[in-house]
Amino acid sequence: MIVSVASGKGGTGKTTVAVSLALALQADRAVQFLDCDVEAPNAHLFMKPKIDQSEAVYTPVPEIDESLCTHCGRCAEVCAYNALAVLKEDVLVFSELCHGCGACSLFCPESAIKETGKRIGVIESGRAGNIRFAHGRLDVGQAMSPPLIRALKKKLDPGRIVVIDAPPGTSCPVIESMKRSDFCLLVTEPTPFGLHDLELAAGAAREMNIPCGVVVNRASLGGGDGEIRDFCAREKLPVLMAIPFDRRIAEAYARGQSLLEAFPAYRPEFLKLFAAIGLGSP
Amino acid sequence: MKQIVVISGKGGTGKTVMSACFAVLARNAVLADVDVDASNLHLLLHPEIRERHVFKSGRKARIESARCTACGLCLPLCRFGALSKDAAGKAAVEPLSCEGCGVCFHVCLEGAVAMDPQVSGEWFVSATKYGPLVHARLGIAEENSGKLVTEVRKKAREIAEAEGRDVVIMDGSPGIGCPVIASLTGTDLALVVTEPTPSGLHDMERIIELAQHFKIRTACCINKFDLDPGYTERIERWCDERSISVVGKIAFDPAVPESVVRRIPFVEYVSNSSSDVIRTMWASLWALVR
């Protein structure tokens, strides 16, 4: 079973919740943790896994064999991303625009295009206690994270409870991370930003037909979480957990301590959260 | 006219709070929310929308079932896992996975695939009491956020030039991927907002590396600096070694989230030591670019 943790707004506590959930479950169950926030992966800073495997990930980009190319222009015509420009004497490849769909090589009448790999990042995997851990790290300067997330999710072990830490937002990297999840936890905070982006994230989960529930972090902030609870009631989103606004939690985070490590009293809360997800029995 | 972008790597470090303060302090700016995926700046600036534009970008495949002969030619060629067989063995598209490459369209012998243009968002030009705001809303689960960012930036620059405004202030998105790159290239200054935590430092290193990759001048500000003096020192040292100036250190101040709850830019909400730091910071940033 796969539980993804998402939020819309960044910095609401996705990693805190995902890591704590995994840690709470690991004593009695086989758990896998996938950090799919490949642009800003952070879970390892709190889980401190022992990494024993590291593999580079490549996406296919076209390479033109000039000796075969007749400059007919077919490749540029079929490329939906303007990643190829055919000039009289030359073919230009803009690899940062390429999605690796393979159209150019497939439709080249001269078979003058072969695909080579362009490195976009790395997947590192290992163990944190009993938890199988893996994350992706997008190379700095690379624009497209979805292929790296897809490669990371190939590591998914269906025999385990899989906790996925998703990136913020609601666009393609988030969708790629949430895909095929059985449940999505949406972490929010009681600010106008938190609520606004919760609406977006809940919309994305709904679009994907993934059942979801809400964790309110910093619940005592400002006027409290009344507005969020009203929204959740209207949208029939269960509020499964609330974590108060507490400087001590922020300080523990700053020390690199997970919530469970700093405040073990939260363990039963996270077990309750997992039970509430409705996937309690393996 | 100068362009300043506020970014962070890690989400939730305070980009939007800072951007809204700069909107107040700059006096002659155009504001742009280039976090098109989860935009929030409008929640603090209370815009009145003056123009609405549809953002069309990309296409998605659709099977015209009556024409599909279930030959199966397209199925193995889709690299995005967007094609499957329906009950009758005909091709079916999973729209969330389709990246609109058109391989199925080009390969189909029966002309059974249509490539429908997509409306993937909206963008707006609004008036606020701090100056014009260009902002956007990417449709849920849509792609091409980078292109929408480019569109928003273009409009903001046009307005600045037409109205003789001296700066475009952009509220950026978290991460280091396509929308961030689209907001970063060609700007005069990137302000990186970080916090003294392991993830704040880790993600700051990556975003500054990205800014340097594109040769963008960078300054840094540490939010909630008193949360962990050790990490604040590490951040300062890291920046110092790379000649990046730390232009402001703001304390962990409950008045900051309060101002957000009240939907008021922080420097307008309260006058205290934190708001003084932000005022000074804006002056330093402006001195760096002008």
Image: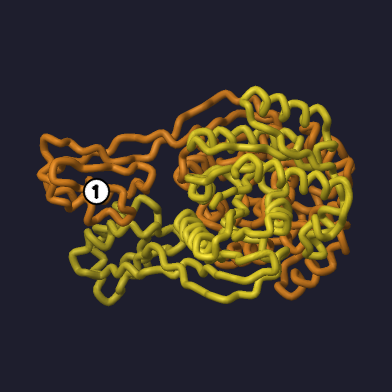
Chain letter of mark 1 equals A
Count of number-bearing discs:
1
Quadrant of the image for the C terminus of chain B? top right
Which residue shows up at 85% across the image and 36% down it?
B226
Question: Residue A63 falls in which quadrant of the image?
Answer: top left
Question: Residue B243 falls in which quadrant of the image?
Answer: top right
Which chain shows up in yellow? Answer: B
Question: Residue B259 falls in which quadrant of the image?
Answer: bottom right
Image coords of residue A179 (percent x, y): 53, 55
Which residue shows up at 60% across the image and 65% down it?
B133
Hue of chain A?
orange
* Residue B184 appears in the figure: yes
Residue A72 left/right relative to A124: left
Three-letter code for the amino acid on which mark 1 is drawn: Ala
Q: Which residue is mark 1?
A: A85
Quick one: A272 or A225, which is closer to the camera?
A225
Which residue shows up at 70% across the image and 37% down it?
B200
